[in-house]
Image (cartoon, rainbow, N blue to C red):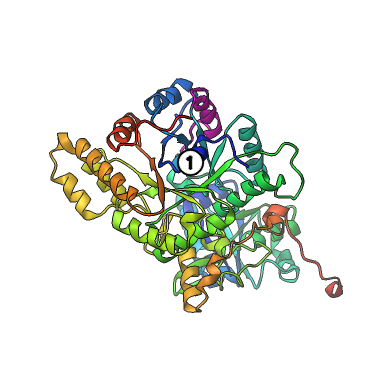
């Protein structure tokens, strides 16, 4: 059964998909969401809305999804297992579907230690793998985890994330295979800077034939400065920024670093497009959403297929 | 063993402020092994309190007693002769012992001198680490002896998450990633294909989530 998801349509029609993301504001002002959204309008097939990313309190993903939907976007509601047990998770899934959200991205969630409430209690009643299974059971079988029938089943295109660069590397393709087996229909990867390693991971993914089961969108993040590149390399766990990229940014005069970052980003897009099994890109322009149109245009990915 | 840490001295001394006669209680079991609340630590804390209170001009009278166990009635009952002569009990036993003594002597308050932390092992002399959360539904057969509930910061059953790097958990650089350990163990035993099995959703009702737990053996009751 096909959902109302534009992202699903784009991928099923064989188009190279472009998604991006919008981090909700740390406040109740809807204009903040609309402002970020306005940059992306017409340049993406769907927009992810993060769920209290890095464990910092923000406007809820579902609420920001609705604001973006009212602007004509196809939102991807990110959902983490950190803050909700299976009761709240299923309840939010029903609510999201009822309000017209067509995509969900299933995540475990960053540990609360990294956020603004490090003394909070976490939940992790289920994990991301089990969340994928949960959504698929609700969508496909019309049943809750308890086995009871859902009256008015939700219909969602189900995604997940995977980090090809985290350890142990050898099981990272297997982990995606597990997620595909659990029912994930698309995956958005961690930011790709190390294209060579990403290529190796894709090779392992193809060996397991996972690219035939799940649409793979490579994560793309433009670097604003050498400072950002260094921060990502040294301070963000699971992020792989090769030394030659740092060096390249370092050798660029400060005022030209943003430009160089976009250049690197475009080269990365070009390279991942050439890797068999990659079905699209997911641009995470962190607090730099205004660059997304230029990236999409320069990468030759504009215009997007009409919804 | 149950592992505990002594509370900061300022916190202990603050709790004791209204009291002059203190029964300082230790335990010969777990808290002795983890060097927190045995007879030795009781003696050290008693001296510290005496010195501090003497300096403050409000001397404290301290009776030191270390029980074989604080979690068994037969030992807890031996405290009886000391209760009338104290204003308060300060316990260096684990949270179980502190509560159990309080249940027996309802006319006295039992103050905690330690923070009870976890069920763990002695990894090396002076190093204790958590191993079990008593979830009531053991999965160590599936993870080849490494507990994801306890040792993964997110207690995830299908790890590792994206924060595992160089075998270390992103939450604490001193904690190995549980799922790296599990994958290593699968490999060691030639069972890496088992990694592909999706671990099912856990029944947490046997854990603390199902409410306080109790075990009854009718045949052993007297």
- Residue B133: in magenta span: no
Q: Chain of mark 1?
A: A
Quadrant for the C terminus of chain B in the image: bottom right
The residue beneath circle 1 is A13
Give above or below for A220 relative to B59: above
Q: Horizontal placement of B84 versus B18: left or right? A: right
- The picture places residue A248, in percent across and down from the top left corner, at 17, 48
Residue at (70% x, 48% y) in the render: A141
Dot 1: element = loop
Residue A194 can be seen, yes or no: yes
Closer to the camera, A142 or B21?
A142
Residue at (66% x, 37% y) in the render: A94
Quadrant for the N terminus of chain B in the image: bottom right
Give above or below for B77 relative to A32: below
- The picture places residue A279, in percent across and down from the top left corner, at 42, 47
- The picture places residue A260, in percent across and down from the top left corner, at 20, 40
Tell me where the magenta segment starts and ends, as one range. A55-72
The answer to which quarter of the image holds residue B217 is: bottom right
Q: Horizontal placement of B25 versus A31: left or right? A: right
- The picture places residue B192, in percent across and down from the top left corner, at 50, 72
């Amino acid at each position: 059964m096909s959902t109302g998801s534009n992202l699903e349509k784009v991928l099923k029609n064989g188009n190279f998909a472009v998604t991006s993301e919008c981090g909700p504001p740390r406040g109740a002002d809807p204009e903040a969401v609309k402002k970020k959204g306005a940059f992306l309008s017409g340049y993406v097939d769907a927009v992810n809305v993060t769920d209290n990313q890095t464990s910092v309190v923000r406007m809820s993903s579902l609420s920001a999804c609705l604001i973006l939907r009212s602007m004509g976007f196809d939102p991807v509601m990110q959902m983490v297992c950190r803050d909700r047990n299976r009761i709240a998770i299923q309840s939010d899934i029903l609510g999201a579907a009822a309000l017209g959200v067509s995509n969900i991205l299933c995540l475990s969630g960053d540990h609360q230690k990294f956020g603004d409430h490090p003394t909070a209690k976490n939940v992790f009643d289920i994990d991301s793998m089990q969340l994928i299974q949960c959504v698929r059971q609700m969508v496909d079988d019309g049943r809750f985890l308890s086995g009871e029938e859902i009256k008015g089943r939700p219909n969602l295109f189900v995604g997940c994330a995977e980090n090809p660069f985290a350890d142990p590397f050898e099981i990272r393709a297997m982990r995606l295979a597990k997620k595909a087996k659990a029912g994930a229909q698309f995956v958005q990867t961690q930011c790709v800077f190390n294209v060579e390693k990403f290529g190796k991971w894709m090779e392992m993914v193809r060996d397991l034939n996972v690219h035939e089961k799940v649409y793979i969108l490579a994560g793309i993040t433009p670097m604003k400065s050498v400072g950002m590149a260094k921060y990502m390399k040294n301070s963000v766990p699971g992020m792989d920024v090769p030394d030659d990229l740092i060096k390249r940014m370092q050798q660029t005069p400060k005022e030209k670093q943003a430009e160089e970052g976009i250049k690197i980003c475009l080269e990365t897009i070009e390279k991942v497009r050439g890797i068999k099994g990659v079905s699209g890109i997911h641009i995470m322009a962190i607090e730099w959403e205004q660059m997304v149109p230029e990236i999409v245009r320069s990468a030759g990915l504009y215009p997007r297929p009409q919804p | 063993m149950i592992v505990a840490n002594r509370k900061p001295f300022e916190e202990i001394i603050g709790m004791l402020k209204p009291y002059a006669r203190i029964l300082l209680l230790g335990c010969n079991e777990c808290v002795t092994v983890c060097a927190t609340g045995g007879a030795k630590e009781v003696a050290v804390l008693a001296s510290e309190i005496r010195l501090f209170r003497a300096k403050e001009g409000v001397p404290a009278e301290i009776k030191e007693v270390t029980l074989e166990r604080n979690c068994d009635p037969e030992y807890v009952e031996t405290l009886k002769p000391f209760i009338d002569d104290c204003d308060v009990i300060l316990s260096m036993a684990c949270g179980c012992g502190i509560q159990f003594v309080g249940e027996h002597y309802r006319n006295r308050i039992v103050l905690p001198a330690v923070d009870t932390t976890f069920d763990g092992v002695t990894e090396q002399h002076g190093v204790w680490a958590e191993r079990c959360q008593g979830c009531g539904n053991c999965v160590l057969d599936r993870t080849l002896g490494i507990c994801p509930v306890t040792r993964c910061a997110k207690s995830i059953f299908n790890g590792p998450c994206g924060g595992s790097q160089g075998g270390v958990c992103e939450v604490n650089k001193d904690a190995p990633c549980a799922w790296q350990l599990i994958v290593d163990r699968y490999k060691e035993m030639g069972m890496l294909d088992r990694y592909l099995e999706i671990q099912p959703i856990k029944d947490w009702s046997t854990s603390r989530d199902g409410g306080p737990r109790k075990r009854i053996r009718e045949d052993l009751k007297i």
